[in-house]
Image: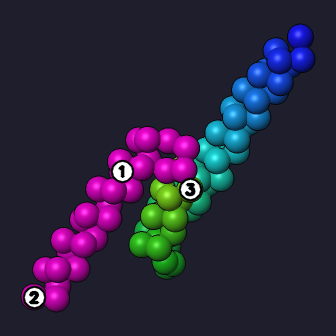
Amino acid sequence: MMHKVMKHTNNVLRHTRRVVIFVIGSTVFLFGVILIFIPGPAIIVIPIGLAILATEFIWARTLLHKVREKVKETKDKIIK
């Protein structure tokens, strides 16, 4: 019986963590998108939001990797 309770508790905690990470990461990401249209450091805030989301979601990790590659390509073009 105790094993079932512990397993259920772990599942609830895992899902709660995912929801909290989603809410915080999405909020930071969307704030970064808003900063594209108003003066602000959108180029810094958007990757931070993606990095938060990437701690729990594979799609965000993939998107963050693509953003990093584009930034690196752009930087290399500017430096040359």
Please determine whether, in this image, residue 24 is positioned above or below residue 37: above
Tell me the crowding category of disc 3: few under 14, some 14 to 19, or many 20 or more residues within 10 angstroms, Cα based: many
Q: Amino acid at mark 1?
A: Leu
* Residue 18 in the image, given as x and y percentages of width and height: 64, 39
The residue closer to the viewer here, 61 or 30, is 61
Sequence-wise first label, 1 or 2: 1
Q: Which residue is mark 3?
A: 52
**Residue 71 horizontal side relative to residue 12, left or right:** left
Q: Residue at x 16, y 88 (%)?
A: 79
Q: Label 2's element?
A: loop
Q: Which residue is mark 2?
A: 80
Q: Residue at x 56, y 56 (%)?
A: 52
Q: Measure the alpha-carbon separation of dots 1 and 3.
A: 12 Å
Please determine whether, in this image, residue 44 is positioned above or below residue 56: below
Sequence-wise first label, 3 or 2: 3
Dominant SS of magenta comes to helix
Q: Which residues are magenta?
A: 54-80
**Residue 59 horizontal side relative to residue 1, left or right:** left
**Residue 34 horizontal side relative to residue 74, left or right:** right
